[in-house]
Amino acid sequence: MPTKKARVAADSSAILKRCRSMLLAGWEDLRATRRAVLKTFDPDDIHDLRVASRRFRALVKLFEPWMPSKNAASMNKKVRKLTRTLGVLRNIDEAQLFFRRHSSTDSGPESLLCRDLPEMRGDEMKRVAKTLALFDQNGLERVVQKLAVSLEKERSADGDSISLPGYFSNISISLFQAIHALLPAAAFREARETRHSLRIAIKKWRYFLEIAGPALDFDCSSILGLLREYQSILGGMNDVAEFGRLCEKLTLSQHERGIVENILRAEDEILLEKFEELIRQKPLTYYFVA
């Protein structure tokens, strides 16, 4: 973890300029990846759109003081719907990749599931396409541009002056406190809900730091790398649970279901061991420069 204090942006106007650039870039990324998904429904594009929508929501959440509350709530609701709409489709794609990796014979899980998952994907694509087509891009564009203009000012939408380094620092502390509260119990074998909550908390802090680092002009690459390690393992555990829920919707025989359950159980055990080792070797501690 970094120990030297990095250079902080000299003034609020420089910070706000960076924030404005990130907001506009995040919005353009969301728009571009949405167009890509509508064209091909490629699994990589679907993943990229989910990430772009989450990052944009993190930007909006962070810059909420500079926009009217009703606009912030409306934008967050619409973009969140976009994120959630893609969830099942993404899980189907990841499930197909996962079971292919774990298939070694004709009786393996790939041959058991390939007859149903592609059909499920086709149905889900139709639902997603409809939601993406109805996404209020033009309406949100106007709100984004208004927010971008607001970010040129050193006062909030309520006219209050804000110390930007202090504002970022307070948010960072709050986000880490959620992680700190969940970590002690997360390694217990039965603490699945705690690990699920921890995964979300880590993701929020990571997205925040990906914004705060460039905004305040400091290097947080080391902590971001560690957060990605945690997120990768916890995300894998969440995928195992999602794959199990997907398979419950399929018409598998008892024998087939047993094969699937054994594969998922073994994967979950491997990931839990990796998680326990990561906590021991690389414990998460607070880091922020402001």
Image: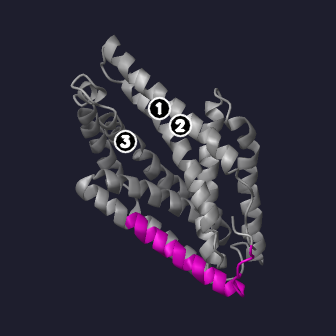
Quadrant where the N terminus sits is bottom right
Q: Measuring 75% from the left and 76% from the top, which residue is drawn there?
A: 5
Towards the viewer: 264 or 13: 264
Residue 77 sits above or below residue 119 on the image: below
Relative image position of residue 230 (x, y in whole percent): 59, 49
Relative image position of residue 228 (x, y in whole percent): 55, 55
Label 1 sits on what residue type?
Glu
Whether residue 67 appears in this view of the structure is no
Label 2 sits on what residue type?
Leu
Residue 251 sits above or below residue 34 on the image: above
Foreground mark, 1 or 3, reads 1
Instruction: Give SS at disc 2.
Output: helix
Magenta segment includes 11: yes
The residue at which mark 3 appears reads as 94
Cα distance in 3D space between marks 2 and 1 = 6 Å
Relative image position of residue 192 (x, y in whole percent): 61, 31
Q: Name the mark on residue 271.
A: 2
The residue at which mark 1 appears reads as 267
**Pointers 2 and 1 in contact (CB under 8 A)?**
yes
Instruction: Give SS at disc 1.
Output: helix
Highlighted magenta segment, given as a residue range? 4-31
